[in-house]
Image (tube, grey):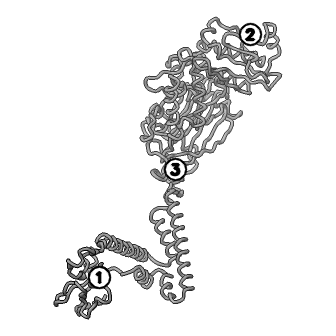
């Protein structure tokens, strides 16, 4: 700014910091020099009020729309959206782990004595409900109950049949202490000669579960008698097997040669170092090939079943538990090497007498952690101890969560899941109400009342295998005449029944594998770009225009602060008006007072350059007492400085 000449003739230099004198000057300077389109029109059309109002309204509307768009962009950024990036790569692939189970938890001959009472009760139920007799008991009228049954199986856990319209009183009870109908023995005989489920499909069948005090009971009903019998048999089977030593039955069938006759990978025979074994409570002995404990990692650089895993399996169906294992064949699951195989979730069955060929394709999923998703890297922050000897998976976490909750609320652990430290498996001889607790807990678990599914998050990195299955009869009728003799000599397979042999081939159908990776859909750079695009669209300006607006806000704030401080100081330092003196009428003629002379006020306004004259608070004089010099002398008054007599008047 040019130097200004002061009132005394000197020049005032520029200050280090200068502010405008009013809000009008600030706004006029901003609109005249800003690079924001439209703002300068306010100054150019200041003499035309209609145009000024139009441009002011248009500028306000565009600013409002722009900041509305800003809000949408910030809101979308706060959601942390992701986009999926799909890439396809081709290289030598690492072969996955393959787990195969026998579909039979124990050889029936090894546990037949322990399951004898349960089998008798189940056969009794099938005969009573359907009139069915097992082939081994065609000559018997009814399976005879053992004297041990009274203490071996609780009375309230017997099967009960409910007739339509009778919701509280069971029509027929099977198992436990007795099998009773609504009448006497002749009535029971009538039931047996005319089984209820063979003539009426509207019946419900189940078993009653009560808590320890017996005041909370419910029925586990099924509309299908077969489903009810299998559920009831499995429930009692769990209680029986908890009393059987783990070494009985399980390790008698532990030799892999009794199940896997032949194993080859890439044309080479497998060895003992290529598989590990574990026992599943439902699917029996399981063998994991190419697992984490294998001596080396299998790899393949070619496709086709000649460059994969080939297995020849034996399925001896005569050893199956008849009332528990209703499927024949083998259970197979393909999974990562460091993950536990959950056969009930991701496995599939292969049939005996059939060659099953499984072609695979690898897919990887990589999720973003942090604010973008609720995935976890290794599950260390979940807070649920992993009961499975493997890396973190969501299935392992969910089952561990349920098992710990089961131990906490029911006082025992569920037999189908790993045993936590310091706990024991449930058995109604020790834990009389564990069934009631378990089924209540299972319902809460399925409805996620236990928050296990919310607590256990997905892993951030996951590998999946998409599979396509093909089937063919093996061996064919024309080749079975020479295949069986050769297998008998080479593999010591003493069988000629195709229902006891199954063949499995697993291989990659292509070396290309897909990787689906999550990437931020709105990173910081894209968000700033969107903000700049909106700013340019509505204002046609740049980042420097933002600095101009910040400068305007700073100037307005500084001017407001200065004016506020000035008004505050003026109020604090302004003197209060003094009271007006009145001469006493009795002593007015004897006492004289000097004239009141004006004095400048001593307050803060004097420093700011403003002077306010104070009026004389004395009473105005009478007109006959005034003289030319401004001093009055009345009768009996006082003389002025020049010898004049003082009167009753006061200097104004």
Label 1: how many residues lie within 10 Å, few (<14), some (14-19) or many (20+)? Answer: few
- How many tags in the picture? 3
From the viewer's side, name the closer residue of 570 and 48: 570
Residue situated in front as seen by the camera: 620 or 434: 620
* Residue situated in front as seen by the camera: 219 or 223: 219
Q: Which residue is mark 2?
A: 142
First in sequence, mark 1 or 3: give its number.
3
Q: Can you give x and y, in whole percent of width and height, for residue 143 in the image?
A: 71, 10
Residue that label 3 marks: 365
Judged left or right of residue 360, residue 583 is: left
Mark in the foreground, 1 or 3 = 1
Residue 373 versus residue 332 in the image, above or below: below
Helix, strand or loop at mark 1: loop
Q: Residue at x 45, y 65 (%)?
A: 525
Q: From the top left corner, tell me how far across and down residue 280 is, in percent.
A: 54, 27
Q: Secondary structure at mark 2?
A: loop
Vertical placement of 56 versus 422: above or below? below
Residue 256 visible, this angle:
no
User: Do the numbered discs 1 and 3 sit on residues whose CB atoms are within 8 Å?
Assistant: no
Q: Which mark is residue 425?
A: none
Category of crowding for the residue at label 2, using alpha-carbon neighbours closer than 10 angstroms: few (below 14), some (14–19), many (at least 20)? some
Q: Which residue is mark 1?
A: 613
Above or below: residue 406 compared with residue 65: above
Residue 243 locus on image (x, y percent): 53, 16
Most distant residue in the top direction: 147
């Amino acid at each position: 700014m040019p130097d200004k000449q002061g009132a005394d003739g000197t020049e005032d230099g520029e200050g280090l910091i200068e502010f405008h004198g009013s809000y009008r000057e600030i706004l006029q300077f901003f609109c005249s020099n800003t690079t924001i389109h439209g703002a300068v029109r306010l100054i150019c059309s200041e003499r035309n009020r209609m145009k000024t109002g139009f441009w002011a309204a248009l500028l306000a509307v565009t600013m409002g729309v722009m900041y509305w768009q800003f809000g949408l962009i910030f809101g979308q950024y706060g959601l942390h959206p992701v986009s999926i990036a799909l890439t396809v790569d081709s290289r030598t692939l690492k072969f996955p782990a393959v787990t195969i189970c026998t579909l039979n938890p124990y050889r029936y001959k090894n546990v037949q004595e322990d399951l004898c009472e349960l089998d008798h009760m189940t056969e009794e139920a099938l005969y009573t409900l359907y009139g069915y007799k097992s082939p081994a008991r065609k000559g018997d009228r009814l399976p005879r109950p053992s004297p041990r049954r009274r203490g071996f199986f609780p009375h309230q856990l017997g099967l009960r049949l409910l007739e339509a319209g009778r919701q509280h009183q069971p029509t027929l009870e099977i198992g436990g202490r007795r099998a009773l109908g609504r009448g006497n023995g002749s009535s029971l005989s009538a039931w047996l000669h005319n089984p209820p489920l063979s003539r009426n499909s509207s019946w419900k069948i189940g078993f009653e579960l009560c808590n320890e005090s017996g005041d909370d009971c419910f029925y586990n009903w099924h509309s299908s008698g077969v489903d009810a019998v299998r559920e009831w048999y499995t429930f009692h089977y769990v209680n029986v097997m908890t009393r059987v030593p783990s070494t009985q039955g399980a390790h008698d069938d532990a030799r892999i040669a009794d199940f896997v006759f032949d194993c080859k990978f890439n044309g080479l025979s497998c060895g003992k170092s290529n598989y590990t074994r574990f026992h599943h409570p439902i699917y029996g002995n399981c063998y994991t090939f190419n697992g984490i404990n294998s001596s080396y990692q299998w790899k393949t650089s070619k496709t086709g079943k000649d460059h994969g895993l080939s297995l020849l399996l034996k399925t001896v169906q005569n050893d199956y538990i008849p009332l528990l294992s209703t499927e024949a064949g083998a259970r197979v699951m393909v999974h990562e090497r460091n993950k536990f195989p959950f056969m009930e979730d991701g496995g599939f069955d292969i049939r005996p007498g059939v060659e099953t060929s499984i072609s695979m394709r690898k897919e990887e999923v990589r999720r973003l952690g942090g604010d973008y998703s609720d995935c976890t890297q290794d599950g260390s922050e979940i807070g649920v101890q992993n009961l499975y000897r493997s890396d973190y998976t969501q299935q392992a976490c969910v089952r561990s969560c349920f098992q710990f909750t089961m131990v906490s609320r029911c006082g025992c652990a569920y037999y189908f899941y790993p045993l936590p430290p310091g706990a024991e498996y449930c058995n109604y001889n020790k834990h009389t109400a564990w069934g009631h607790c378990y089924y209540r807990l299972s319902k809460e678990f399925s409805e996620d009342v236990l928050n296990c599914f919310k607590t256990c998050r997905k892993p951030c990195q996951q590998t999946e295998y998409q599979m396509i299955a093909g089937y063919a009869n093996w061996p064919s009728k024309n080749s079975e005449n020479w295949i069986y003799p050769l297998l008998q000599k080479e593999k010591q397979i003493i069988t000629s029944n195709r229902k006891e042999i199954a063949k499995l081939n697993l291989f990659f159908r292509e070396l290309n594998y897909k990787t689906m990776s999550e990437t931020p859909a709105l990173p910081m750079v894209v968000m700033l770009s969107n903000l700049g695009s909106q700013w340019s669209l509505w204002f046609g300006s740049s980042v420097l225009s933002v600095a101009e607006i910040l400068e305007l806000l700073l100037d307005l704030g500084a001017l407001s602060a200065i004016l506020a401080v000035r008004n505050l100081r003026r109020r604090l330092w302004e003197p209060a008006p003094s009271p007006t003196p009145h001469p006493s009428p009795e002593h007015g003629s004897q006492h004289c007072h000097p004239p009141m002379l004006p004095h400048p006020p001593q307050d803060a306004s004097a420093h700011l350059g403003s002077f306010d004259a104070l009026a004389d608070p004395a009473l105005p004089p009478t007109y006959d007492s005034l003289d030319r010099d401004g001093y009055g002398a009345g009768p009996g008054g006082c003389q002025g400085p020049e010898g004049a007599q003082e009167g009753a008047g006061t200097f104004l």
